[in-house]
Image (tube, helix red, strand yellow):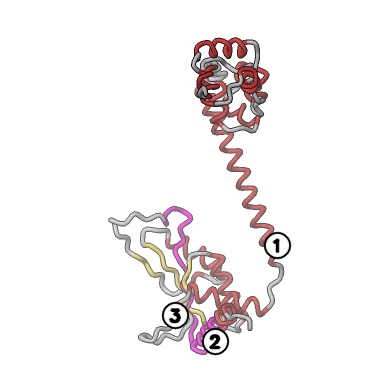
Amino acid sequence: MAHPENKYADFEGLRERAVALRRQGYSLRQIRDELKIFNNDILHRLVKGEPPPQWTKRPNAKDDLRARARELRLRGWTYDRIEAELGCSRSSVSLWVRDLPKPEPKCTPEEQRARMNAGLVRLRDSRDQERRATKAAAAAAVGELSDRELFFAGVALYWAEGAKDKPHRRTEVLKFINSDPNVIRLFLRWLEFLGVRRERLTLRVSIHETADVEAAEKFWADIAGVDTSAFSRTTLKRHNPRTVRKNTGDTYRGCLVIYVRQSADLYRRMEGAWYGIVGAATRRPD
């Protein structure tokens, strides 16, 4: 009995027939059925080097995009514009049009930089507007503060920024220092809510000796709603020449120190309330 592979003995003859069928537009399946070649490896060897007929190729979903990209490139469009127009990746655009000539620049390098800078300005303005809108909406959402909310806000503010009593150093007194005018305003409003009269406050400016001390005192006096004569002597901080300071310039006003005399009871109430807030916030519901 003849071996079943003997029919492949005349390989060259089969190849000539397979190539002829291929050039007539036959698919691999049609050649297989015509020549009764059911070994895929041999079938592919028979037609090796012969391109498949066009009708057997599967349509590529990106063919239209590729053609459009090439058309736009020939019209002088940049990669960025093509990418934005077609909604495809930069790598795809590059692959499709890299054999085409690079468009001649339509403006000088100076004009390109000017356009880029103008674009950056527009982008920054847009982001600034977005920031302002978000902050304004958040501020409006707060509405009116209740007495309870104001008390808790002041307690949290003091615990974050104020002086604390230590077991090794008993200092049960309200002493607050900050460089942010709004923080100072809120703290003073909190003290007012607690019934602390301005006569119980000792106010003092703390600032580097190289700054405009007189302007800083006037600035903080306006924030606190007092005359500069109500301030204690300003504390001047010496500048270390080896340290690079960033808090310089006309906007540097130092810090305002607020000391509340006879405030041990208020300090204890503040600390107790703080631990009450922490306990309530971290308590797991039953």
The residue that appears at 53% across and 71% down in the rendered structure is 227
Q: Position of residue 136 (x, y in %)?
A: 67, 57
Q: Position of residue 140 (x, y in %)?
A: 70, 62
The residue that appears at 56% across and 84% down in the rendered structure is 276
- Is 84 situated above or below 226? above
The residue that appears at 28% across and 56% down in the rendered structure is 242
Is residue 89 part of the magenta span, yes or no? no
Q: Position of residue 13 (x, y in %)?
A: 53, 10
Is residue 263 part of the magenta span, yes or no? yes
**Quick one: SS at disc 1?**
helix
Assess disc 3: are there few (<14), some (14-19) or many (≥20) residues with their C-alpha within 10 Å of its C-alpha: some
Mark carried by residue 62: none
- Is 101 situated above or below 177? above
Which residue is denoted by mark 1 in the rendering?
140
Q: CA distance from mark 3 to mark 1?
A: 33 Å
**Quick one: SS at disc 3?**
loop
Magenta range = 247-275
| Quadrant location, the C terminus | bottom right
Comparing 238 with 225, the one in front is 238
What amino acid does circle 3 point to? Lys
Q: Earlier in the sequence, mark 3 or mark 1?
A: 1
> In the orientation shown, which residue stands out farthest toward the left?
242
Q: Specify whether 122 is left or right of 201.
A: right
Assess disc 1: are there few (<14), some (14-19) or many (≥20) residues with their C-alpha within 10 Å of its C-alpha: few
Q: CA distance from mark 2 to mark 1?
A: 31 Å
What amino acid does circle 1 point to? Ala
Q: Specify whether 245 is left or right of 157.
A: left
Q: Earlier in the sequence, mark 2 or mark 1?
A: 1
Mark carried by residue 269: 2
Quadrant of the image occupied by residue 55: top right
Which residue is denoted by mark 3 in the rendering?
164
What amino acid does circle 2 point to? Arg
